[in-house]
Image (cartoon, rainbow, N blue to C red):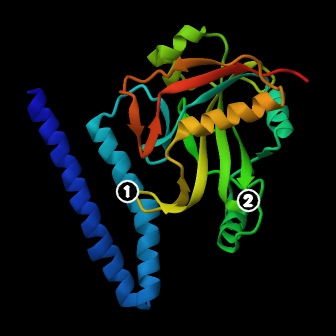
Amino acid sequence: MRLLTRFFQRFLVLCLGVLSVWLIVFVVFDTADHRLPWLLAVSVTYGLAAYVILPNVVRMGLKILHRGFIPRYTVTGDGLPGDPVNLVLIGTLQQLCDAFAAAGWSTADRLGMASSWRMIRAFLLNSPYPTAPFSTLYLFGRRQDIGFQEPIDNSPRKRHHIRFWARSLDRSEDDVSAASFWLNTDKPSADQRVLWVGAGTRDTGFSLTWLTFQVTHATDSDTNVERDHIISELRARRVIGDVTLHQSGSRLQTGKVNHYITDGEIAFASLIEN
């Protein structure tokens, strides 16, 4: 019975895939091609396919498959694996901001129409934008609370960056290995001393997402190196205490997550008030 159920789920997902191809090619493109110049028809088809049709098809497919796991990585708006979680800092929001400011990192702008357009322009012209916004990733059922970045060669195309989600300190560190730790959606107040759960990666250039073909940054696959880089920078400024390593709360095997390579270890450290 279980095998039959799984087969039926995969059959439904296959049907969704076929339906999405038919919708993109024979409905969207065919309609646009009859009413618009060919190049504009292709552009409209790409926009609707990459940002409307395919994300919703992926989301529906994941619901059908009942992808229930304890993540050791963030999730995109489409429900796909995002950046691995690799750093947790303990302290207040002000301490977090002060620590990264001391390390020379900038706080990312909020994602919006104006900041997105400025980012696109800076990316194409390779002009500096040290507070460029981040795409939205999800953890604990909500988008990131804050993010920091350090440009590489003063370019918006390459940067060290990390997103953080606030998590209450009411639970002990042992709860990191429990499902409840990762599935809780409560957000503590900004003035509390909390766990800042972070996912740090290094952007390396331009890319398209592998399933929906949305425009995005290409990233270095080795997030262990990026975690160690961030820790090294914070240590050099003496804004964190001793660092300990914990395995993340995932039931997945250590190895590749999305296109990333990770050892599954999260660095924990307390922020120090200067």
- Please report whichever mark, 1 or 2, sits nearer to the chain's N-terminal start: 2
Q: In this view, does 191 lie to the left or right of 266?
A: right
The amino acid pointed to by label 1 is: Leu
**If the image is split into quadrants, where does the N terminus sit?**
top left
Q: Name the residue under label 1.
A: 211
Image x and y of residue 72, in percent: 47, 29
The amino acid pointed to by label 2 is: Asp
Q: Give the Cα distance between marks 1 and 2.
A: 30 Å
Q: In terms of depth relative to the viewer, which is nearer, 97 or 24? A: 97
Image x and y of residue 26, in percent: 26, 76
Q: In terms of depth relative to the viewer, which is nearer, 80 or 255? A: 255
For the image, the number of numbered tags is: 2
Q: Mark 2 points at which residue?
A: 153
Check if mark 1's residue and mark 2's residue have beta carbons within 8 Å. no
Q: Quadrant of the rendered structure where residue 239 is? A: top right
Q: Which residue is drawn at 83% across and 26% down?
A: 238
Residue 199 seen from this side = no
Q: Residue at x 67, y 52 (%)?
A: 159
Image x and y of residue 71, in percent: 45, 29
Q: Quadrant of the rendered structure where residue 35 is? A: bottom left
Q: Which residue is drawn at 40% across and 59% down?
A: 212
